[in-house]
């Protein structure tokens, strides 16, 4: 039995999802003539109570388009030092938009309105770049799937309005945050200028993300999607997977969170584990004691059919997901409890 806990991106479409996909109606989305893509975009925009949504091949392209429409070359955005837009998008912030990053170094990728205020460059000081955008990530990937508190997000939104800054949410795993905190998606739509959401992580779709934005920003977004090579033709087959997932796979995220919490408890009982980040959703980040090797731990698990990923500095990550079944979970907890280094 192979147990793949590298990421929630490793899932494959279920038979029911494939059946739904095969029965959808498609057209040419570059001409906005694919009815299934249009249906998905309208549904997600309505969920977040935002004007428009635009379907993209990837979350990275979605974030990069959001940054492009919210900034000008030479500007600076504010984000966590662990942010996906800074660490895992190939330097696209600078390459695509000519923008630099002001990094906030706070625990688990969180920061507050005061941190943002302290990071804004003086607008009349021409030696420093113009601060124009604040990006937050919910849930925080390198923060171990941790969820932002709405009060903090709201206070930052107010600050952004006061200082004429745009506000972007990298909501790749916003589904997990919403389920965990019991927050309606529309509340996020009230706070942010742009939001990216991913369908190919916890929701089990093979491909796809969406950018949520205003009517005005949509015209720029579709232009930049084309420039970035993201215009797709009969992409309704992919959008259909998203429609199926939104109807069937959101509430079940609680199962992934429950399994992750049980893994956390088992890890805490192991003598060679130094620390486990508090688990809220489906990501578990833990640190092996410096007297032991994380590489040896990874190799031992691989021999047992378990795949996971190292993060450097003896830290490791596990991610539960749709294809991680109850049988996988029972077997993994048994393997984990018996590992020795």
Image: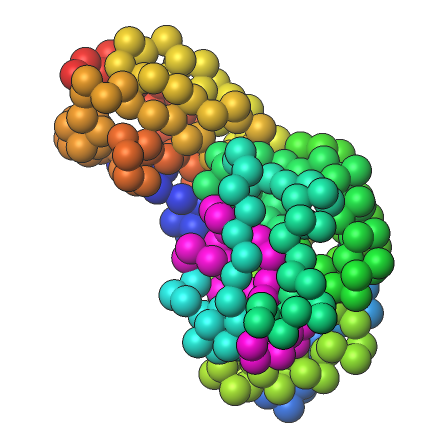
Identify the residue at horizontal 79%, vertical 66% (top origin). 164
Q: Give the quarter of the image for residue 113.
A: top right
Bounds of the magenta segment: 59-88
Q: Position of residue 331 (x, y in %)?
A: 32, 21
Describe the colour scheme in one phrase: rainbow
List x then y, in percent, for residue 4: 33, 39
Number of callouts in the render?
0
Residue situated in front as seen by the camera: 227 or 74: 74
**15 magenta-colored:** no
Q: Residue furthest bottom?
A: 31
Q: Determine whether, in the image, residue 152 is placed left or right of residue 243.
A: right
- Does the stretch in magenta take in 75? yes
Q: Nearer the viewer, residue 141 or 266?
A: 141
Can residue 270 be seen by looking at this rendering?
A: yes
Side of 83 relative to 132 (left or right): left
* Residue at horizontal 40 percent and vertical 13 percent from the top: 268
Residue at position x 63%, y 41% in the image? 111
Q: Is residue 304 above or below residue 109?
A: above
Q: Can residue 54 be seen?
A: no
In this rendering, would 63 be left or right of 95?
Answer: right
Depth order, front residue of 216/100: 100
Name the spot of residue 223 as percent of width and height, x first.
62, 86
Q: Quadrant of the C terminus?
A: top left
């Amino acid at each position: 039995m192979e147990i793949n806990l590298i990421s929630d991106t490793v899932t494959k479409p279920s038979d029911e999802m494939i059946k739904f996909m095969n029965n959808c109606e498609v057209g040419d989305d570059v001409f906005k003539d694919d009815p299934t893509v249009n249906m998905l975009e309208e549904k997600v925009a309505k969920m977040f109570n935002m004007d428009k949504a635009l379907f993209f091949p990837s979350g990275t392209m979605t974030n990069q388009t959001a940054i492009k429409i919210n900034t000008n070359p030479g500007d600076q955005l504010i984000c966590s030092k662990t942010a996906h837009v800074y660490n895992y998008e190939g330097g696209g912030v600078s390459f695509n938009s000519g923008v630099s990053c002001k990094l906030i170094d706070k625990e688990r990728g969180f920061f507050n309105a005061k941190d943002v205020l302290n990071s804004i460059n003086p607008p009349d000081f021409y030696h420093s770049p113009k601060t124009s955008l604040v990006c937050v990530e919910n849930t925080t990937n390198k923060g171990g799937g941790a969820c932002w508190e709405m009060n903090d997000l709201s206070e930052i939104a107010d600050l952004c309005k006061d200082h004429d800054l745009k506000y972007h949410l990298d909501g790749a795993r916003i589904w997990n945050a919403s389920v965990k905190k019991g927050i309606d998606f529309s509340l996020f739509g009230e706070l942010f200028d742009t939001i990216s959401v991913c369908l190919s992580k916890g929701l089990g779709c093979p491909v796809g993300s969406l950018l949520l934005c205003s009517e005005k920003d949509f015209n720029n977004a579709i232009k930049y999607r084309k420039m970035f090579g993201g215009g797709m033709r009969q992409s309704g087959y992919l959008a259909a997977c998203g429609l199926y997932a939104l109807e069937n796979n959101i509430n079940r995220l609680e199962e992934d969170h429950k399994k992750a919490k049980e893994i956390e408890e088992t890890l805490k009982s192991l003598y060679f584990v130094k620390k486990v980040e508090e688990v809220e959703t489906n990501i578990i980040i833990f640190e092996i004691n410096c007297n032991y090797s994380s590489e040896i731990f990874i190799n031992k698990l691989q021999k047992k059919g378990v795949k996971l990923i190292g993060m450097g500095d003896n830290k490791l990550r596990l991610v539960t997901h749709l294809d991680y079944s109850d049988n996988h979970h029972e077997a993994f907890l048994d393997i984990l409890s018996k590992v020795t280094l």
